[in-house]
Amino acid sequence: MNEKHDSDCRSKYTQKLSHTSLTQDEKTEATYHMGETNDKDIHSCSCVIPIIFQYLPAKDLLCAQRTCKEWQTELTPPSPAATWLYQSIVASRWPWAKVPCLTSNDDNGATYAEAINYAERMKELYIKSQYVQESLLPTVWSDNDFRQSCKYGKYSRWVLAKQFDDGAFLIDLAWAVRILYCLGPQAYLTLDGADISAYDPAFSMCASYSPGWRLISNRNGYSAIQQQLLLGKDSYASLEILDQVMAQGKYAQYKPRKPLTAHILEQQPEIQLSKNENWSRAMDLEEHTKLLSFLLRHPESRRALLWDIDGVVCRGVTSLAKEWYGCWDTLTGVDAYSIGEPHFRQVPHMFNMTKLGQHVEALSWDECCGF
């Protein structure tokens, strides 16, 4: 019985090897080691398990982790296989997101200590991101008092629509803010005193002496710089997301089966292919998790963002496009005269959303996700 079990084991993992990207020499050596062992149990494959683990998908690795204590240890930091495990899990869970890379100051590559820290960092990123989206978000959004209070706000009552009951749309809002902040016009961070002004959610909900509001109070000054406030093709993705999020509340049948951000970016492969440093920053999973956690833990900032979004979307996001981009749905069939002419009341909200992104990025991981 043991011999048959051992033979089945070798056969199973030889088959696994054939589907990996190992070189032929590595496969031959691994198969040789499996064949020469005299052990009569599943651990006869232990010498090649670490190699195989680094080429298996996340789903198989999670199953392997629960198989026995030895394999669980092999998939626990600082094992190289553990690093691959959490990289693979994160990539399969958030395929459109960017994750930290293993970097080193050593010309010879990452040190053992750096590898351990990286594996632990990837593990924490997966656990915290999953917790924020699947536990903290439903808990916070189920607080009916906050939602009911939104019905008294001119630009926040839209979240009372049934399509927003699960709160998942907040995940997309956080991605939109990241894209706007990282890829949008620098004018929202420099003009009208924005470079010296601190983020304040109150600026979103009433006229004040703050960036954006001061600017539009002087119509002549606003007309002179409004072209600096328009969004390019990549940064316009933020407005596409915001517009389609609100469309979910207007049309009951409109409910994508995957996150809206992923759905939109998959439709626009050229945007993905034009990735640059700023795009990588925008889609940074750590920063997105920080921002989403911040919004969930600070109700006034969450409320302010709802005001900002409706304040922009209700006046037409197409007016904020620098030019006509055929890749975006909101610009399909739009008359040219409605593009590149932002409504003055949209401007303060654009400033506020950009400042929100800047404010949270400056916070530490522990300040946002220290729970």
Image (cartoon, rainbow, N blue to C red):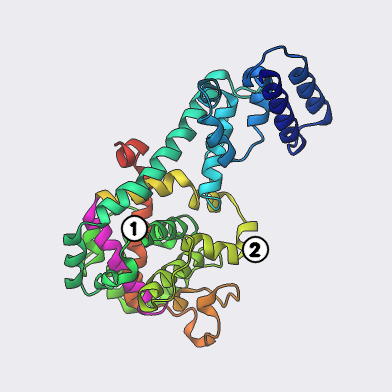
As for residue 306 lying within the magenta part, the answer is yes
Residue placed furthest toward the front: 1
Mark 2 or mark 1, which is nearer the start of the sequence?
A: 1
For residue 70, what is the image quadrant?
A: top right
Could you say which is closer to the camera, residue 265 or residue 74? 74
Q: Secondary structure at mark 2?
A: helix
Q: Residue at x 27, y 58 (%)?
A: 302
Which of label 1 and label 2 is nearer to you?
Answer: 2
Mark 2 crowdedness (10 Å alpha carbons): few <14, some 14-19, many ≥20: few
Task: Please tell me whether residue 199 is drawn above or below residue 310 in the rendered image.
Answer: above
For residue 369, what is the image quadrant?
A: top left
**Magenta-tinted stretch:** 298-316
For residue 111, what is the image quadrant?
A: top right
Residue type indicated by callout 2 = Glu
Task: Please tell me whether residue 121 is drawn above or below residue 350 in the rendered image.
Answer: above
Could you say which is closer to the camera, residue 15 or residue 141? 15
Let me know if residue 151 appears in the view.
yes
Q: Secondary structure at mark 1?
A: loop
Could you say which is closer to the camera, residue 58 or residue 109? 58
Residue type indicated by callout 1 = Ala
Q: Which corner quadrant holds the N terminus?
A: top right
Relative to 274, 359 lies left or right: left
Could you say which is closer to the camera, residue 52 or residue 132? 52
Residue 56 screen position, x and y as percent: 64, 37
Residue 28 screen position, x and y as percent: 82, 25
Which label was assigned to residue 270?
2
**Label 1 belongs to which residue?**
194
Q: CA distance from mark 1 to mark 2?
A: 32 Å
Which label was assigned to residue 109?
none
**Is most of the magenta stretch helix, strand or loop?**
helix
Relative to 88, 363 lies left or right: left
